[in-house]
Amino acid sequence: MTDTNSTTQQPQTPPQATQSSGGARGRSAWLRPLALVGLLLGGVALGAGGYAATAPTDGVAWRENIRLAFVQRAVSRALDDVGASAAQEAKIHDIVAAKFAELGPNPEERAAMRKQALDLLAAPTIDRAAVEKMRIDAVAKFDAKSKAVVAGLLDIADELTPAQRAKLAAEIERSWRNATRWRAGGATGATGAMVR
């Protein structure tokens, strides 16, 4: 007899499944819809930011090009998630670029508003009627820009099919939940990405 049968073999544990470092979805799966939400909110913020009284006016075109590139990239990712065709993507990118140009800040207008605000503040007596008129004008400009943002969003929605819009809404909702959990210190997976 040989000793080969007398050796006890240790049970082998099955190899642990490793999580991929992202794969096709990973961390960007929740960033894409979050970026679209950022686009929607950013459009409104762009309108309001264009009228910020203390914002500097130098380098505006450069910053706007960077913002447009960021938004276009976020839109591309969102459109990829919903399976948009190349024709849909082209039309939507044209809409985004046109709205960006329409809503972009006007440095001369911003500088004039800033000067007016500082002049009103530095006056020996505060002209409440002039301050109120300035506020009403700023609100009217913001309202016009917010209407343009909504019109752009509706134009984009018209380019998507009902199924694509439903999928996009679901992605935005999932992204919102994940972002809320993240801000609250919610659970993350081994890769640091939010757990769905």
Image (tube, grey):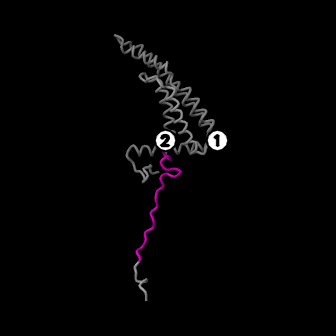
Which element type, helix, strand or loop, lies under badge 2?
A: helix
Residue 32, x across and y down, in percent: 51, 43
Kindly report which numbered mark, 1 or 2, lies closer to the viewer in this rendering.
1
Do the residues bearing badges 1 and 2 touch, measured as CB atoms within 8 Å? no
Residue furthest toward the left?
124
Residue type at mark 2 is: Leu
Secondary structure of the magenta portion, mostly? loop
User: Which one is earlier in the sequence, the residue at label 1 or at label 2?
Assistant: 2
Location of mark 2 (residue) = 34
Q: CA distance from mark 1 to mark 2?
A: 22 Å
Q: Quadrant of residue 5?
A: bottom left
Residue furthest toward the bottom?
1
Q: Which residues are magenta?
A: 9-30
Residue type at mark 1 is: Ala
Residue 102, x across and y down, in percent: 56, 26
Along the line of sight, which residue is nearer the eye, 189 or 1?
1
Q: Residues within 10 Å of mark 2 (few under 14, many from 20)?
A: many
Residue 169, x across and y down, in percent: 54, 42
- For the N terminus, the image quarter is bottom left
Which element type, helix, strand or loop, lies under badge 1?
A: helix
Query: Mark on residue 134?
Result: none
Location of mark 1 (residue) = 86
